[in-house]
Structure formats: structure tokens, C-alpha cells
Image (cartoon, rainbow, N blue to C red):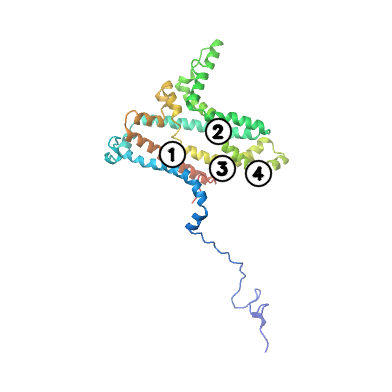
Amino acid sequence: MLRDDTKTGPAGDLTSPAGTGTSKDVRKRGPRTRRTRPQPLRSRLKRDWQLLLMAFPAVGLLIVFHYVPLLGNVIAFQDYSPYVGVAESPWVGFTNFQWLMFDDSFWDATINTLSITTFQLIFYFPVPIMLAILLDSVVRPRLRLFIQGIVYMPHFFSWVLVVTLFQQMFGGAGLLSQTLRDNGYDGVDLMTNPDTFIALVTAETIWKDAGWGTIIFLAALAAINQNLYEAAAVDGASRWRRMWHITLPGLRPVIVLLLILRLGEALNVGFEQFFLQRDAVGRDAAEVLDTFVYWRTLLTGEWSYGAAAGLVKGLVGLILILVANKVAHRFGEQGIYKRS
């Protein structure tokens, strides 16, 4: 009896892939990869207890000085009095927020804050980037360290000292005014001119913090692959072309991240710098939300009103961070957290 070989493969019992057999095909499968089960919490704690112990002081300070004070925002919904405490203060709901929305001084402080933030985003935010690129291009290590030490130093000065130095330079009896008078011109007093106050505080911020802001960008520049620069130089790319096509794209994730964080602090431009110069230029030019909360809370005793203003400022900052991070995701950047 003849054997029908059209339905059997080379092994005799399997259908050949090229045949016309009616039995099921047997497909080759690779080795199965076992999914590792996550370790129990007790095992992970036992493994990483040294690291957790090292992080405990920092986490404790964060909880005590950042998260526990958040509970104090409850007084924004009360007619709070420090003499009776939170428990005995009467609840007023959103009355403080309603008064805040119709307060002209609050809106004046908000407009000043947003104007200063916008001005500094344009004229201050790019300065640390450019300074980091210039420092990175310095070939000699000793000269680079010397320049870094000079530009970092003003960050450790207090705002009292910074304002005093600018007063000695640009005040009515300062160096600039004296030089103009010695040459037959009228002296100038930039420290009391409300029209130039926004440029003055931006110049003070640049002198004080621009050098310190270069640290993050210098770290980002060190992470860029140097072979890209060598390959671009071999291809004939100039220094400007290498900066445009290699340096700036390498810095883009850090720039986006810091820009998002800066937008989150759009309503927080500082307190000491404006408090020290408020009387010299007037409230209309120097009143920001931080000083507004101080004057309306500590000096008048309107604790709930000031807490409501601070809570509104924090919520607006949170919304700006979320919106800016969403825009960063649309442009393909990670932002401050990954997309869900």
C-alpha cells in the first residue's frame, strides 16, 4: 500500500509549510520570558533601609516646613483672630475671596507682578544660557574657574547689600550722577524714578543671580556628546552653526523645564528686593503681591484676607505650571513630569 506523503512533513508527522495538508501548522516560538514579580514591601525596606535613613531628615524638614503649613490656609475661609485661634474663629466661606476680587490695590499689585515677570522672562531668562555657553567655550580651566567664581559671588550677597551698591552707583549722589555733573551735565537718580524701576530691578536680578543660574546649564552642556562637535567641525560647520544645531538642541529640555518652573512662580517675584525700594519709587511702581500680602496682613491684622491672597497666588501658579507642561508635551518635551 502506497503512503501518502503529501500530508506529512520532513519529520513524518508534521505538515510541511509548503504542502497542502489540512492539519494544524506548528509555529516555532521563542523562549518565554518570565515576568519578574515585584519584591514585597518588607523586602525592599530591608534592602534600602540605609538610603531611607539618609533621606529621612530631608523628608522630615520638607513635611514640617512645607506641607504642615499648608493646613494654615484654612484661615482664608474664616474671620481669623490669633487671640481665639483657628478652632474658635467664625467661618465666612468665600467672603474674603469676594472682597479680594473687588480690591483695586490687589489688581494693581497683580498687574505690577505680571509686568515684572514678563519683562524678566524676556531680558533675564536668556542671560544665564548665554553666560553658560560663553563659560563653556573658555579653553583654559583656571581662567574658567576664575570667571565662574566672580559671576557666582553676587548670589551670596543679601538684597540689602545689592540695593546699597546700586544706590552708590545710580543714586542721586552716586557715581554715575557725579560723573555727569563733573562733565557739565545734569545728574540722574535712577533709584527713585518709577518709570525705570522695572529695568532697575531686572538689572539687579541679573547682577545677583545670573551667574548662579548658569550652574544647571553648564551641567547640561557637559552632558552633550563631544563627538558631535568634532564631526560637525570636520564637516566644515562654523562655531555659530555648531551652537545652533548642537548646543541649543542639547539645552532645550533644560530650558523648557526651567521655563515651566519660572511660569509657576510668575506671581512670586520676591519680597526683600521690592520691600527695600518701595518707599523710594512709590507704591504704584513697586507694589507686588508679596508686599501686598505683607502690608495687608501683618500691619493691619487682616490675617484671613492675606491668606486668601496667598492662596489665590498659589492656585494661579499651579494652573500655569499645568498649562505650560501640557504645551511642552505637545512640542515633544517631557516637562516636569511624563505624559500619562
Residue, disc 4? 225
The mark nearer the N terminus, 4 or 3, is: 4
Residue bearing mark 3 = 253
Q: Which residue is mark 2?
A: 212
Label 4, secondary structure: give it: loop
Q: Nearer the viewer, mark 1 or mark 2?
A: 2
Could you classify mark 2 by the number of other residues whose Cα lies within 10 Å: few (under 14), some (14-19), or many (20 or more)?
A: some
Percent of width and height locating residue 25: 60, 74
Please, what is the three-letter code of the amino acid marked with disc 1? Gly
Residue at the location (51% across, 38% down)?
259
Residue 89 screen position, x and y as percent: 27, 38
**1 and 2 marks in contact (CB < 8 Å):** no
Residue 71: x and y in percent read 36, 42
- Observer-nearest residue: 56 or 153? 56
Badge 2 amino acid: Trp
What kind of residue is marked 4?
Answer: Asn
Residue 191 screen position, x and y as percent: 47, 20
Image-quadrant location for residue 278? top left
Which residue type does callout 3 highlight? Pro
Q: Which residue is mark 1?
A: 317
Q: CA distance from mark 4 to mark 2?
A: 24 Å
Q: Nearer the viewer, mark 3 or mark 2?
A: 2
Is 208 drawn above or below residue 77 in the view shown? above
* Cα–Cα span, label 3 and label 2: 19 Å
